[in-house]
Image (spheres, rainbow, N blue to C red):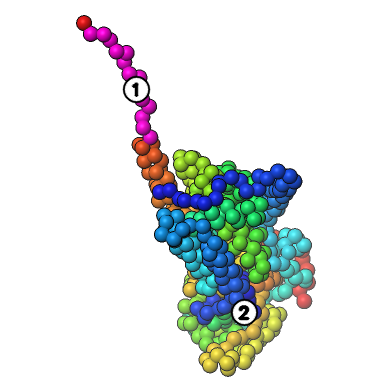
Amino acid sequence: MTWWCSASKEPWSWAFRAYPGIWIFTALLLVGYLLAFRRSPSAAGSEAAASDKRKRWAFLGGWALLWLSTDWPLGTLGSGYLATAHMTQYVLYTMAAAPLLMVGIPEWMARRALSKLRAYRTVTLVAKPLVAGIVFNVILVVTHAPITVDNLRTNQFGSFALDVAWLLSGLVLWLPVCGPLDELKPSLPARGVYLFLAAGLVPMVPGGFLTFSATPLYRVYELAPRVNGFEALDDQQTAGAIMKIGNLPLLWPVLAGIFIRWANQDRATPPPAKPRPASTSGT
Amino acid sequence: MSETTTLPPSPPDSSPGPGPGPRIGLIAALCAIGAVVFLGIAAVYAVRGNDDTATGADDNDGWHGTEVSPGLPRPDFTLTDTSGRPFDFAAQTKGRLTLLFFGYTHCPDVCPAHMSVLRGALEVPGTPKPLVVFVTTDPARDTGPALRKWLDQYDKDFIGLTGTPEQIAAAERAAKVAGSVRLPEDQSSGNSEYDVGHAAQIVAYTPDDLAHVVYPFGTRAADWAADLPRLLDEEWPQESAS
């Protein structure tokens, strides 16, 4: 039985493949979240309860994206056939599932979990934009190095580790931007600059390597049975393009939103009071 | 929009006593060091990645295939090319760098991968273009036009050869590769498709009309791009061909 998607030498077909490990992992994530929600302190009908409801939907959206990008067919294609699918998975994990999951965690749940895990200081450290940016990009580079992909994608545990690393790196990336704890978020302009540099600029470099390499870099995708005649180098170049620009559909709207909020915040701030001219006595 | 919370925003693990602070710092530092070391190793391997092959190039005089000594003589056989004309392999490829491969167009894995990799290698600037000769091991399905259509996906200059099963078996023997065998049909799948077991290596004949290196499945485009110029220019020691 195959528990998690990993590379196989079988020719690609659209025949369904079951991965019970993925179902168990995603089910545990959802059940854990819903169980935690049963202890919500928000009173029914309150604004907090309405906020919790929105967060639940956000989490469900993130969870669904996580599942769809991990399971058959995208997970199967990404683990052993196409670098393009591998990169699509990565972008979905880090740029879609992770921010939605992060938005879906209410503040009370985060505080409760961090208190139980005694992890507040660690999260505080990781939420610093410099640390989060480095962690995200180190994981990006390491998990896309040919040696990592070629070795980890060929076995289920390695493939699982890769997927979990991507999810964690995505959560770390978005923690300072849309994390549940306001005291860990930098100012709005700092958030915008952080996101632009960490998620927009740095990934261009490894993406460029993939796009402009003369030969395929990943053994696992180069020697895989071809899917619809999609050649290995074309596949890799497409993957590189996805790495470079696949984040833009989310990144730029979020950046625009941040700067609009910043502008609104700035406008709402009352201007400093002008010094009143000294009164003069009339004639 | 304000978000109501019922818990104070104080750090929950800021309680006095032997807290997790130093331990977490240590763990974070170890993780960071581990990540840097791993990244370093990954970078080294990434740089060396194009030299890394299934055959262990470092143990093989830098070749990305398996060295054969003494070299295998260019085989002498005549088959039919995709336009229906006879093709005398020894005569028509004499003195030229030639890659010979036995496979079939319905092959689900090895043949398309080999052809695709070769195509990729030949697109690398500066790579010399060898004659690529593909001999079908499935003459029943691989007619001349079918073979031509399949090869054209990769390169219109690739040469496709077919013949009777006996002629193909004789060619395999002459090239000293394992004979192909038709595998039983998969009755459970309910279709009449069958596979053919065949040699998975590409034999590279150099201008001295000997094959000094054979390339197994797993040879990559970067490996070919590195080896093809060498195969063309290498000064091979004079040896008596067996």
Q: Is residue A62 visible?
A: no
Does residue B128 appear to the left or right of A282 in the view shown?
right
Return the residue nearer the eye: A192 or B161: A192
**Is A277 contained in the magenta span?**
yes
Return the residue nearer the eye: B152 or B94: B152
Residue at image point 52% right, 85% down: B142
Q: Quadrant of the C terminus of chain B?
A: bottom right
Name of the residue lying farthest toward the top:
A283
- Badge number at residue A274: 1
The chain that hosts pointer 2 is: B
Residue at image point 46% right, 58% down: A43
Label 2 in the same subunit as label 1: no
**Mark 1 surroundings within 10 Å by alpha-carbon count, few (fewer than 14), some (14 through 19), many (20 or more):** few
User: In the rendered image, which quarter is residue B121 located in?
Assistant: bottom right
Residue at image point 59% right, 78% down: A10
Q: Disc 2 versus disc 1: distance between alpha carbons?
A: 89 Å
Residue for badge 2: B102
Name of the residue lying farthest toward the left:
A283
Span colored in magenta:
A269-282
SS label for mark 2: strand
The kind of residue on which mark 1 rests is: Lys
Q: Position of residue B200 (x, y in %)?
A: 65, 77
Name of the residue lying farthest toward the front:
A43
**Is A153 contained in the magenta span?**
no
Residue at image point 59% right, 86% down: B195
Does residue A50 appear to the left or right of B104 in the view shown?
left
Q: Position of residue B21 (x, y in %)?
A: 70, 45
Return the residue nearer the eye: A36 or A206: A36
Magenta span: predominant SS is: loop
- Badge number at residue A113: none
User: In the rendered image, which quarter is residue A218 located in?
Assistant: bottom right
